[in-house]
Amino acid sequence: MRPPERTRIRVSPGAPALLAVFVWLSSPEVLGAVLLAALCHELGHYAALRRRGGWVRAVRISALGAEMQVAGRMSYGGELLAAAAGPAVNLLLAAALGLLGRWWEPLYLFAGAQLVLGAFNLLPALPLDGGRILWLALAWLTEPYTAQRVLSAVSLAVSLALLLGGGWFIWRLGGSPFLLVGAVGLTGWNLREIKLAKGG
């Protein structure tokens, strides 16, 4: 089967709104480092997908990141590798840029952005890559229905823990609210998915 000529791209209203808040609360350097990390992340996914015989039919960009609609036949193992490729690229670049930062200090900022994005996406909660990886591993070992039930519970628990932990951290120590914004988005997404699964 031949891949489509064009990949459809859809941007939700939350994405530009979050970007505007980010511009307002942070420096251009931080914004540039985060956008570069996001680009490297998605390129990692794309390269792994193409390598495993899949292609991207559509991309939806939301406040929680980019979600790819994949076409083509792929095994659980192939999908798992493609899901892990994005965070893996971020973590490898974080290590490389961290080493190079010894000679040029501004690279530490870019290393930090790569590290935070890669580590955050490995959390076992949907719609993050870690949630997808967990579902694929469970479906591979058991079956999709069991995998979905376990993942739903784990996703909600992780997002609520992140929400409470992020709120406590900011209240006690101050700092950037972006972790809390991400936690609110994750919690809302998982509560909505549970409601849809129950037919509400």
Image: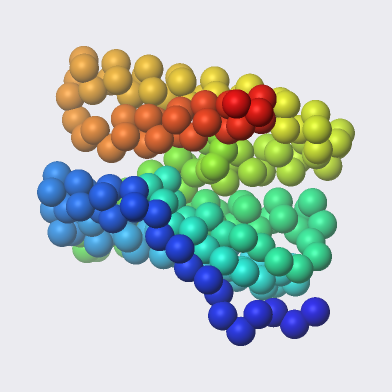
Question: Where is residue 12 drawn, in percent x and y?
Answer: 40, 54
Residue 92 at least partly seen: no
Q: Is residue 22 left or right of residue 129?
A: left
- Labels in figure, total: 0
Residue 166 at least partly seen: yes
Residue shown at the point (62%, 60%) measured from the top left: 69
Q: Is residue 79 left or right of residue 5?
A: right
Q: In this orientation, which residue lies closer to the viewer: 140 or 68?
A: 68
Residue shown at the point (63%, 22%) measured from the top left: 153
Residue shown at the point (66%, 25%) measured from the top left: 198
Quarter assignment of residue 136: top right
Residue shown at the point (49%, 58%) measured from the top left: 60
Q: In this orientation, which residue lies closer to the viewer: 4 or 82?
A: 4
Scheme of colours in the image = rainbow
Q: Quadrant of the N terminus?
A: bottom right
Give the answer, above or below, for where 190 lies relative to 97. above
Q: Residue furthest front?
A: 200
Q: Quadrant of the C terminus?
A: top right
Quarter assignment of residue 49: bottom right
Q: Is residue 78 left or right of residue 187?
A: right
Question: Where is residue 141 drawn, in percent x and y?
Answer: 85, 37
Question: Where is residue 40 drawn, in percent x and y?
Answer: 44, 64
Give the answer, above or below, for where 86 lies relative to 21. below
